[in-house]
Image (spheres, rainbow, N blue to C red):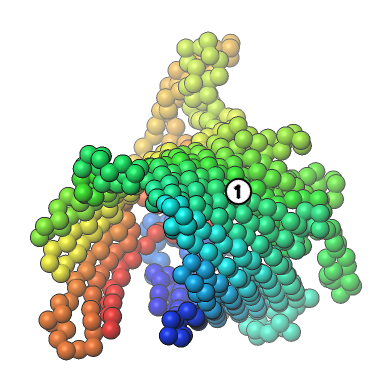
Amino acid sequence: MNDNSMIPGTKLSRVNLMARATTKYGTAERLSTDFKVQYSNTNARNRPTTGVNSRNYSSLLYTLPGTMDITQFKDPLNELGTMRWYGTGNQVNPYWASRYSQNEDIRNRFIMNGSIKYQFTDWLNAEVKAGADIYTTNTEAKTYAGSPLSTNGSYSVGKFTFSELNYSTLITAKKDNLFSRFGASASVGGNLMQQHSSRLSNNAASLLVPDLFSIKNSQGNPGITDEVTEQRINSLYGTVGVNWDGYLFLDGTMRNDWSSTLSPANRSFFYPSVSFSYVFTEQFKSLPKWISYGKLRASYAEVGNSLSPYQLLNTYTIDRDPNGNPTASRKTTLFDPNVRSELIKSYEVGTELRFADNRFGVDFSYYKSNATRQLIDLPMDPASGYEKRKINAGNIQNSGFEIMADAKILDKGFIWNISGNLSMNRNKVIEISAADKVNRYQLGGFDDVSIVAVAGQLYGEIYGSKFLRVTDEKSEHYGQLLLTAEGRPQRGEQNVRLGNQQSKALLGITNSFGYKNFTFAFLIDARFGGDMFSVTQAMMQRAGTADITAPGGKRDDMTLAGVVSNGAGGYTANTKSITTQQYWESVNTNVGNLGVSELNIYDASNIRLRNVQLSYNLSKKLLGRTPIQSAKVGVSCNNVWMISSHMRGLDPESVFAVGTNATGFENGAPPTTRTFLVNLSLSF
């Protein structure tokens, strides 16, 4: 796979290889083996960055003056050999960055799995498995001299290695007719998991000799990162299942883990599950013929999660000061050796029904889960010597339902199938840390906009600033903008709730068609509800490149609807007009980094044509006497068409913090791409 990207100089290539061998031994074929090896090599050059920074081409182009032709800077060097650019400050010519600010990472990865299984009888077998996931990532970054990034250039190299080894065994017994119509199954096994990782990196933030890329060429002491982590989890588990006459099923599981990252008193944690299902159409054969299949189900489960390595004891970090003298410093997080594993409890009930000789079906589920004893970093007073402390706290509740339905509209000659999925989820913060009197926890954000978890509210509340308005509920002007004497809007209350990032519902509908050897399918999906703050819109408004700053291409004076104080405790309607420049200075340019937050909260609802596929199966007559048993050629397109959106040209899926739960925050995200694929499948 080769992806040259829409950004010049950016490229991602990947090579995947896989080999698998399965064998059965003996006349009865009781012994069997299965071995698989996968190898992948991934090479990424000049990965783009996000957010408002000099390396994000998207944020730079969003704010580039509309009258300027970016291609005039295609030759990135001036007569002095430094970066050619129109402005000052820390902006970087994207053509220069694509050639002279380079980064590369290469990952070689092996995934290996093997199993040996022996079938003692028709109801008893034993299996031994071993697996490994091993990869090494080498990184290198070069920044040449002559730009705001670095006067003489910078250089960094690094290496990260990771390995996970798993060894497991499982003994299984299963008999459908143990006695009469009673069946049962049971299994017992164990797993040994070991992880090891190491990271070694060197960073020369400023080079002594320009463009000589060597760590030894660092002007000062290079930054060195040298980390090694190890952890192990040993597990024992088992299952028990019983069934009656093929329509009543009761299954239970038990698992106990011992984690090396927890203290001896807490490293053992147990979590069970139980499930019940009832296929009533198998018991009652006299049901109406239009009922093809019916099943009821219910389950309860617990899941435990361990702690990351080396977050139990308070240790010191050994380093050197600028003069090369050794230093020892405490970490910024205060660890507690008494923390326990996380615990998630979940319930689910549902039904699966099919009708009219399986032409129509529906599957409904209702669920509720509570994540408790979560391992979080609670902020502390910096005067304590720490920024945060690790504790068990929180109770996050997920509840909702999901409905899946499908139907065969036509099935003779021309085939038409349709399927849909509707889900609604409510993620609510029941508690954060009542013992510490903490009711709010920050998930992400920037400047005066924050995404937070608030006790008693839905997860992912968005906080920021609002316009100043009349707050006297007895006034006839209650809720109207309170303007200055010149007619300008003002920022009012800060750190107040503006919305929530959660969607109210998600919907997906797939239509698939078939005629002779052709198949065609398309997927439409939709998100309803949820809010998002857009930094991109805020910085475009500040630069004057957003369409809202010049409606219809004009920047006429405006008279805002609102009131001004009459100096006697009352209000009068505004009659003063202001220029477009004055308006945006008041709501953006002169108000912090992001302006009045309320202005750039958007509804993240959207409807899109997600995917379109067309394929053709070559006939066996066409393949003739070739060794090819079947062949299919197809084309597909992803992210085809944004049918409806409310974010003024931005994709609501362009979230900034993909590595966190703060999905209601967008910051300089590049445009999402439309992908075309051509595939050929052969079987021999």
Looking at the picture, how far across and down is residue 612, in whole percent?
A: 26, 60
Residue 639, given in percent of the width and then of the height, sits at: 33, 58
Q: Which residue is mark 1?
A: 302
Q: Quadrant of residue 132?
A: bottom right
Q: Percent x, y for residue 165? A: 63, 74
* Labels in figure, total: 1
Residue at (53% x, 35% y) in the render: 498
Instruction: Determine the residue positioned at 74% across, 56% down.
Output: 268
Question: Who's the residue at 21% across and 54% down the image?
Answer: 417
Q: Is residue 413 above or below residue 224?
A: above
Quadrant of res 403: top left
Near mark 1 (Cα within 10 A), the count class, few <14, some 14-19 or many ≥20, is some
289 or 214, which is in the foreground?
289
Residue 191 in the figure: left or right of residue 498? right
Quarter holding the C terminus is: bottom left
Horizontal side of 346 relative to 395 (left or right) equals left
Nearer to us in this view, 575 or 588:
588
Q: Nearer the viewer, residue 248 or 643?
A: 248
Mark yes or no: residue 109 visible.
Answer: yes
Which residue: 49% across, 25% down?
481
| 436 lies above or below 375 | above
Furthest toward the left, the residue is 413
Residue 462 appears anywhere in the view: no
Left-right relation of 483 to 227:
left
Q: Position of residue 357 (x, y in %)?
A: 21, 49
Secondary structure, mark 1, is: strand
Which residue is farthest front?
A: 180
Q: Give whichever of 4, 228 is nearer the camera.
A: 228
Q: For the residue marked with disc 1, what is the amino acid?
A: Glu
